[in-house]
Image: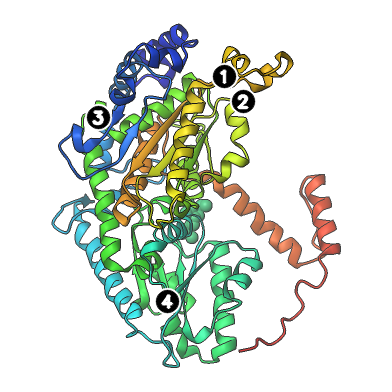
Amino acid sequence: MSTFTEAPAYRALQAHHDAMRNVHLRELFANDATRGERLTLDPSLHSGQAVLGLYFDYSKQRVTDETLKLLIALAHERGVAEKRDAMFRGDKINVTEKRAVLHIALRAPRDAVILVDGENVVPQVHAVLDKMSAFSNRVRGGEWLGATGKRIRNVVNIGIGGSDLGPVMAYEALKHYSARDMTFRFVSNVDGTDFAEAVQDLNAEETLFIVASKTFTTLETMTNAQTARNWFLARIGDESAIAKHFVAVSTNQAQVEKFGIDPANMFGFWDWVGGRYSMDSAIGLSTMLAIGPGNFRDMLDGFHAMDEHFRTAPFEQNLPVLMGLLAVWNNNFLNAETVAVLPYEQYLKRFPAYLQQLTMESNGKRVTRQGEMITYQTGPIYWGEPGTNGQHSFYQLIHQGTRLIPCDFIAFSQTLNPLPPHHDLLMANVLAQAEALAFGKTADEVRAEGIPEWLVPHRVFPGNRPSTTILADKLDPATLGKLVALYEHSVFVQGVIWDIDSFDQWGVELGKVLAKKIIGELETGDAELRHDSSTNALIRKYRKARGAWNVKQPAPKN
Ligand code: F6P
């Protein structure tokens, strides 16, 4: 296969871009009265699957019918369909780790057959789901009691990266559906403050810790898990009580046992589930405890509906394919460096943070799958905040700054908390922002408002700033599943176009190795330092100034 920038479709897109670089969205809309309805996808209409219910309006992207035709040709040329089918088949498409990539198996129906090395993995998936459901029902129903006979009221998930961001995002997103008589906390940072604050008002007798780690070796998680164990034993004083208060989610049974958690209290998953693709595996145990197995199943069904859409819909009507292609267009032809994800839904406040790992750990790569140096831009920077807060913070730059920042607006027609007039105001704002970004305000329009000439340049909005609006009926478990799967598969499409391995993450390794070395140097205060002069000086300064960090903690109060 030729490299991305040598592909005939890339060259055709480059020429097309040169021809249309100065075309304004104003013009595109003025020349086509149907554009706002035509350049949208509502898969329930297009593919006869009345299940998706996500209205995807990309008419405010800087594309024409010709752009779309060429982008779709690019997808065919780069082998998106073949690679997608290889993923669904269980081929080892994570080439650097020689692993299958099968998060789609996590939400497959019970009777599906998906083979890894000749073995159908679907029964294993459902066995774990059944075990999670039985456990969640016992905890939620007050059957699973703490060691002193008290009901479990608090769940603390200890994990980091994919073992934290998915669970915390899903908990926040689906809080409306959660057991309100239970408290959920999430500890991820190795900064002791994270743990200390998470448990400071919790009663150990009523607390369940979930130690969530695919590898069960991650420094942050293991340190927090050990601290949790010490915290718990200092209050309960009985090793045998651990069995009622600690469960593990991992692929590594040996390490789980070594830590002291009974394998009976372990919920497994598999090496073909990437950390950032694991929120619908056993890593979602905290989510299931919060919303119950029925709602969790609905979420999985939402994921599966999007998987099926991605697998079967023609590219022209395929949400993840189009989303991925538009991202490539903005990234490689319009030279946008970032993407702002702007959910107009308070419950999605952690969605941008979740997407940061999904997108940037997946596509932040600089060599091809074959290890050749890449000469084009790959994964953009994702960031964002829920609306309307961002409007009073960084939107200034999106509207009038010098950079082009494509935006994903996410909104829901129905609110889960009807408090008139809030929802209409929220919706008015999201619609207004997308409109303002696309069409802006010209100097003549500013002058017509009587603005003095010297102020006119400051009051002009250039417009032509691309955005997509995703509108769903309401935020429920199934819709969340569809939304996450949409981004997962869009990331996949982009990775295929750029010819990168979207499923490894070697870039996190070097820092881990260096940190291990420095930990030793901090512990033995006089060890000889062989770093660069800056790191050496910082270590010396820290050694001197750290104070009494290792002074024994006072005995805990019960
Ligand atoms: O940061 C690297 C990483 O491996 C992520 O990909 C992963 O989600 C996270 O660490 C946590 O890993 P684990 O679940 O093995 O503790």
Other-residue count near label 3 (Cα within 10 Å), few / some / many at <14 / 14–19 / ≥20: some
Circle 4 sits in a helix, a strand or a loop, which is it?
Answer: loop
Q: Is residue 85 visible?
A: no
Q: Nearer the viewer, residue 158 or 451?
A: 451
Per the model, the C-alpha gap separating discs 1 and 3 is: 31 Å
Whether the residues at callouts 2 and 1 have beta carbons within 8 Å, the answer is yes
Question: Where 505 sits versus 63, above or below?
Answer: below
Which badge, 4 or 2, is on the more N-terminal residue?
4
Circle 2 sits in a helix, a strand or a loop, which is it?
Answer: helix
Residue 181, disc: 4
Which badge, 2 or 1, is on the more N-terminal residue?
2
Per the model, the C-alpha gap separating discs 2 and 3 is: 33 Å
User: Which amino acid, mark 1?
Assistant: Pro
Which badge, 1 or 4, is on the more N-terminal residue?
4
Residue 400, disc: 2
User: Which amino acid, mark 2?
Assistant: Gln
Per the model, the C-alpha gap separating discs 4 and 2 is: 46 Å
Question: Where 425 sits versus 73, above or below?
Answer: below
Residue at coordinates 46% horizontally, 41% vertically from top-left? 359
